Structure formats: C-alpha cells, structure tokens
Image (spheres, rainbow, N blue to C red):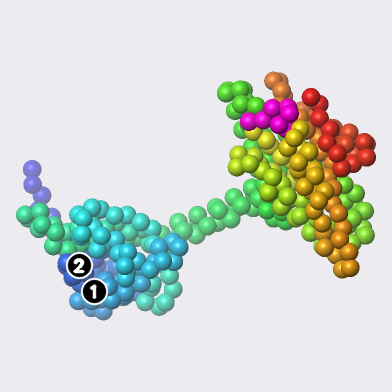
Amino acid sequence: MTFDIDWQRLLEHLHDGVYFTDLERRITYWNPSAEQITGYQAAEVIGSRCSDNILVHVDMEGVSLCLGRCPMAAAMADGQHRAAEVFLKHKSGHRVPVSVRVSPLLNSRGQIIGGVELFSDISSQHVLRRRMQELEELALVDSLTGLSSRNHLEAELEARIEESHRYRIPFGVLFLDVDHFKAFNDRYGHDVGDQALKVVAATFRACARPFDLFGRWGGEEFIGIIRHIDAPGLRAMAERIRRLVEGSMISLPGELERVTVSVGATLFREGDDLVHLVRRADQLMYRSKQAGRNCVSCDF
C-alpha cells in the first residue's frame, strides 16, 4: 500500500516548529509554527546559517549551543538523532523553553545532505516543573535551617521502618533539643535565636554521613535518622554531635555565647511505629534535660 502525501502541507500544519538546513547549516525551510514560536518570519531566516546565532540556543545551564555545541552539527556529523530541552531567543528578546529533536536529512542514496530540527514550546511545562519544584522544596525543606522539614522527616521515618521490616537494615533516631532556648530568645531576641538554630543545623550537616538525615521537628527540636548503625555507633555519633555543638559559638556584640543540646538516642525495634519510636527518643531527650542538659541519654 502506498500513500500520496503532501509533505509541504503536512509540515505547514504541524504544531511543532520545523526547519531544515543544508550541510553548511544554512536554513532552507522554516514552517509557520516556527514563525509563531520564535517571532521570526521565514523570510527573515531562510538563507541564514544556524551559526549566525539567530535563535541563540542555550542549554538549561545557560551555555551557548549555536557556536560550539550545536546538536544539528553533531547530528549531521555522526548521523545520530538528538533530543534535548533548551532555551531559544524569541525575536522580541525573551527566552522560550523548547523541546528539540534533531535528525540528519538523507537523500535517496542514504547520504547526509543536511539536518532537520523539530521544536515545541514547553513554557507551560517548564513553569509547572518550576512550581512543582518550589512546592516540593517548601514541603521538604525547613526554610530557616535548610534541613529537612517535619513532613520530610515523617516520610523518611516511615520509609526506614518499612525498609527495616523488609531487609533488616538497622537504624537509629536522635532527638535533639537546644538547651535554654526560651531564655536565649528572651535575652537576645528572636533574630539571635534564629542564628543559634542555624549554627546547630550547620553542625548537624557537618556530622551527617551521606545516608543520614537531619531535620527540624519543630521550634528548637531536631531529629536525626541514622542508618546502618548499631548501639555503640549511635552512642558515639550522638556524643560527637553534642561535643561539636558545645564547641560552637554565637557571635554577639562584645561576647561569644555557647549553645548546647540535650540528646535522646534509640534504635528502631521490631513492633515500633513512627509515633512510638519518636516518643521514646523524645523521652530520652528529657532524661538528658533532667540530668543537667548538654548530655546524651540512651536506652541500650
């Protein structure tokens, strides 16, 4: 079965922008959708070269593609198809995010005689992805400390509990509370209190292994989820964090103020759920408060 297809008509009614080039990357065809997406009319670009940098393609990091890393040139050089998401410059000056697909253009003998690029405006998708990323960051990251939010901590705790049930991977929980934080705030003000929380958070980040997670549970309370750990290891980590926080200082006019934390440390046990696990770590932290603060309490 054969089809008599009017390719010119088909290309002119595509929603995607399409343009052809010869081996010199000189533009030989520019369809109406390309005009609409870029703002350039066919008469303005046909006969020009891609290397004239008309559309000023840049990748998602802002690196120029037209003058050195052109997908069209690469496709014509090796005969391979290319696909990418890039930004082009609209005639009016603003950037337009586009999805591009580039292929070599072959003659009837299979020889490469040029290239073809299809590109589609993904502005709405790009905006949606950015919004989703922003929402994800808002949900997963505590805005003050940059550590994980409570929502993220709860999700990770559930994941670690499930992981322990399935694969017997041990993990522990640290519950950490900044000592005398209310008095600190009352004496120096909330801005300095926030500075203290940031210093403590930075210490947690410095102590964490790549597969550990620290986050802000609420107020001046923090939780650490420590994977692949046994009782001696968890105790040693808790003591190390406590000492490092104790060695941190808040710089105030004319003085340095020390910050300390009280810590509760417990290992996940068979039968624990999130509520019981966190409550036990919290109770151990209060045991440290009662013991004079700036210490670690464990239940093993």
The label shown at residue 219 is: none
Q: Identify residue type, mark 2.
A: Thr
Quadrant showing the N terminus: top left
Residue 228: image quadrant is top right
The label shown at residue 49 is: 1
Q: Earlier in the sequence, mark 2 or mark 1?
A: 2
Say left or right for 234 vs 138: right
Identify the magenta region. 228-234
Kindly state the secondary structure of the residue where label 1 is placed: loop
Say few, some or many: other residues with alpha carbon within 10 Å of mark 2 (under 14 / 14 to 19 / 20 or more).
many
For the residue pair 271 and 78, the one nearer the viewer reads as 78
> What whole-number distance in Å separates the C-alpha atoms at marks 2 and 1?
8 Å
- Does the residue at mark 2 contact the one at mark 1 (Cβ under 8 Å)? yes
The label shown at residue 21 is: 2
Q: Residue at x 24, y 74 (%)?
A: 49
In the image, residue 232 lies in the stretch drawn in magenta: yes
Residue 283 on image: x %, y %: 85, 32
Residue 233: image quadrant is top right
